Amino acid sequence: MKFSYLTVVYTIITAAWCLDNVHWVDIWNGSPVLARFTPPDSFINPQGYFRNATIRQTLHLTLATGVLRVKLSNEFGSSPLEITASTAALTANNTAGSDSIDASSLQELTYSGASSIVIPTGGTVLSDPINISTSTQQHLTVSLYLAKGQIGTNTTSHDVSHTTTWLGPGDQTANQHINGGASVTHWYYVTEVQGQLPATSSALICIGDSITDGTGSTTNGNDRWVDDLFRRTQAAPATKHIAVLNAGIGGNHLVTSPGQGPSALERIKSIIAQPGVRYIAILDGVNDIGHVATTAAAQDALYNQMVQALEEIIDEVHQAGLFIFGGTLTPSFYDPPSNPDTSNYANPQRAATRNRLNLWIKNEAKFDYVVDYAAALADPSNLDSYKAQYAFTNYIHPNVAGHQAMADAWDLRIFQQVNGTSGQSLSRRGKHHS
């Protein structure tokens, strides 16, 4: 077969155009922390965890893709982590938390062409891209086999996944089902799934604590407020190209220590660097307020510290040319009084700090948009407490209906309003409120 010079040139130009019109976008995120919970006894050995074990976990993807890669993390491990074998497949019947896969979709994950990889202590690794067709809100199953396990008792996890993960003996990465296993509700080692998508696609990453992470939602229900928001954006043609990702960590703090995982201030640079991110939302600070002394001096100092942290985060995001959306802190008082006041959060001085910070967020902070979660959830007769229909049992977190109310508080027109402007210029023009 003969090719003309023009045919070759056209082919090269077409290939270059295709590459220029796609990019990597995070389509799933699970923020890593140092695991607080030990695995079931059968997956603990004298040297550490998961020796000769398979970890199978399901991940609720956002945008559809035909090419993806998986990021693994050993950021909190105390020893190098050898992944002996790993696979990805579509989850059977697209069911969250299932131990079963669609065997016809099974693919081996490789790392620079190798089937196994040693992730150094504190390190991360990206798999090679695989061709696998996923739909919007597809469940992807990732199975990891650790022949040697994690040496030591420090391991990288997302502690509260609200999704069932399956553990099984031996290498079961290619099995359709996990045999002889146990289940937990944590994710291990997998922190991102990245999809190759059109250049018009982007991601909104939502930073937060347990409220964002999903406390009050249902196991395997994918009904956290972030999930609900993604369903809303998918129903609107103008926002169907946006992946909505969860960077919540239960027990996370905005700035003070100790909290669970790195604080939001410590995390912001790495979140900005995630592929395809264009928008960042932050709802964090309730745990800072709940763990600082209730004296006026201590709470005043904390307020100033939190304002400074948010200003730094806003500046970091705008300097990267991205948009940042703030959110008012949610209610934290018990109501009705029959609920015993045993919480650090249900304190008048702490409520005053929360309300003071919320006023600053709405009226002074240079966010590009503010979602008033407090107004969406609060009891009109007691603004420091949830409406009963939105309260989880502890009245600190929203229930399933409360998560939906948080998602519904977003005005999706904001994405059209900021389109085509830089984060800095929009910030100078002023912000929008829900």
Image (tube, grey):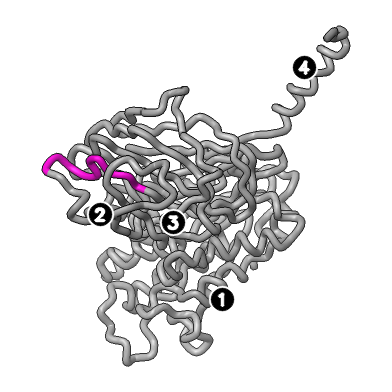
Q: CA gap, disc 2 to disc 4?
A: 52 Å
- Mark 2 and mark 4 lie on one chain; the one further toward the N terminus is 4
Q: Can you identify the residue that label 2 sits on?
A: 36
In the picture, measured across the screen, residue 206 lies left or right of residue 421, that is: left
The answer for how far apart the CA atoms under marks 1 and 2 are is 32 Å
Q: Name which residue type carries label 1.
A: Ala
Q: Is residue 324 above or below residue 7?
A: below
What's under tag 2, amino acid-wise?
A: Arg
Foreground mark, 2 or 4, reads 4
Residue 324 visible in the shown view = no
Neighbours of disc 4 within 10 Å: few (<14), some (14-19), many (20+): few
Residue located 55% across and 76% down the image: 375
Name the quadrant containing residue 41: bottom left
Q: Which quadrant holds the C terminus? A: bottom right
Please tell me whether residue 123 belongs to the stretch shown in magenta: no
Viewer-proximal residue among 367 and 397: 397
- Spatial distance from mark 4 to mark 3, Cα to Cα? 43 Å
* Residue plotted at (42% across, 41% down): 174
**Mark 4 against mark 3, which lies toward the viewer?**
4
Q: Which mark is residue 248?
A: 3
Q: As drawn, is 323 to the left or to the right of 396?
A: right
Magenta-highlighted residues: 46-55
Q: Amino acid at mark 3?
A: Gly
Instruction: Kindly indicate whether the residue at mark 1 contacts the one at mark 3 (C-beta within 8 angstroms).
Output: no
Which type of secondary structure does the marked residue at label 4 adopt?
helix
Residue occupied by mark 1: 376
Q: Kindly identify which residue carries mark 4.
A: 12
Q: How much space separates mark 3 and mark 1, taking CA atoms? A: 20 Å
In this view, which residue lies farthest toward the left? 46
Mark 3 / mark 1, whichever is N-terminal: 3
